[in-house]
Image: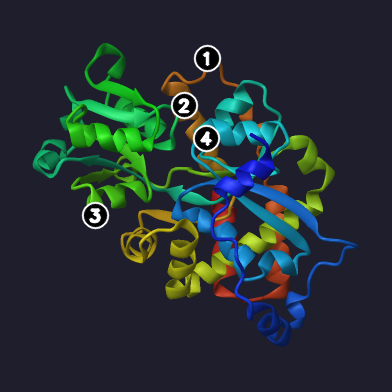
Amino acid sequence: MNLREWGRKLRVGLGVAGVFGGILAATVAAADTPAQAKSPETFRVGYIMEPPHGLHYIAKEKGFFKDENLEVELFQFTNVPEGLTAVKTGKLDIGTFGSAGPLSFIAKGANFTIFGGIMIDGQAIIAKPENAEKFKTLENFKGKKIGLVRLSTGDVVFRGALAKLNVDWRKGEITIVELSGIGAVVQAVQKGEVDAGIVFTPHFSIAEKKGGLKVVHYIADFYPNYSCCRLTANSDDFTKRPDAYKRYLIGLIRAYKFYQENQDETVKLIAGWLKLDEDIVRADTYTNHVFQINPDPYKKATLDFWRLMREAGYAATDYPVEKHIDTKVYREALDEVLKRYPGDASYLKLDAFYKENN
């Protein structure tokens, strides 16, 4: 399937409010002056249906990408391997497909660069309500059957947490059932084929609201602040046009401020884009804080995630993935935003986060 066909089938909610252009033109400050170029540069961006990925959409809908003279097209994918293959073959410029997927591709020789992020945390374990009491602690999972998607973020972090407690799934102390997708995990829990399942936002909230299931743990209960979806690009393209990638990150950084300060509109934008109930988006994004939206490269946590992958047996050797993580361009983007808006609390928060985590 070519990218044009993907776009017809998978692009979601990319309309821009007709009055926005006039409002923007009348109110934009000098600091928001668009980057100057002969014509807009294009980015084709792939994502999975998760509320945190709305950072892309906010930047597009609110004109932050346009301010940077960028034309951004968004394409929804149903699974990580398909999305990363599209990045690898040049059908996408940027992919936001977990941490495990990009690192696995890199370790197998893919010439990828991780240059930013979208989210931290965001996975949960679901079970039937009558079984919830059986999963009070991680030790209670012994002897149980757990459904998950292999190499999903939740899979890697869960196995890492088990290893820390010396619970060995390889010896059958826990039975891990690898399923084809998140929908299959939810169905397996509902049918009693597994005792519990690991899924990502918003699927656990949908399973609670519409599927009669219950969240028994967030994966962050076992491993707080783990790396999730990373911004991934082909290294050759990233090297050829670093200024364009910097401007893309400026758009996301400004979208981060919007998400921090405009809860109601953020919920409406993301819910409309992904065709989700607003109460689910609000609960996951703000009320329960089941994830953090953050465009930072989060290098230290990404490298620790690579350690978890090795401990889980997903990498035979300690491949030097660090050389595929670039923090310089994000730093330049953040410096540019701080120059435009000195003293802004949201941007200073990102600055402190960067200094601590990279």
Mark 3 — residue? 209
Give the alpha-carbon distance from disc 2 to disc 3, as whole Å: 32 Å
Residue 4 found in image quarter: top right
36 relative to 244, above or below: below
Residue furthest right as drawn: 38
The residue labelled by disc 2 is 309
Tell me the amino acid under the disc marked 1.
Ala
Front of the two marks 1 and 4: 4
Q: Are marks 2 and 3 in contact (CB under 8 Å)?
A: no
Mark nearer the viewer, 4 or 2: 4
Badge 3: few (under 14), some or many (20 or more) residues near its Cα, within 10 Å?
few
Q: Amino acid at mark 4?
A: Val
The residue nearer to you, when weighing 324 against 57, is: 57
Labelled disc at residue 316: 1
* Residue 272 seen in render: yes
60 relative position to 146: left or right: right
Sooner in the amino-acid sequence: mark 1 or mark 2: 2
Task: Note whether 317 is above or below 279 in the view shown.
Answer: above
Q: Which mark is residue 137?
A: none
Instruction: Tell me how far mark 1 sits from mark 2, CA to CA.
Output: 10 Å
Could you tell me how far apart the alpha carbons at marks 1 and 4 are, in whole angstroms?
Answer: 21 Å
SS of the residue at dot 4? Answer: helix
Q: Which mark is residue 80?
A: 4
Q: Amino acid at mark 2?
A: Met
Q: Position of residue 319 (x, y in %)?
A: 61, 22
Mark 3: amino acid: Lys
Spatial CA span between label 4 and label 2: 16 Å
| Residues tagged 3 and 4 counted as in contact (Cβ below 8 A) | no
Eye-nearest disc, 2 or 3: 3
Res 250 quadrant in image: bottom right
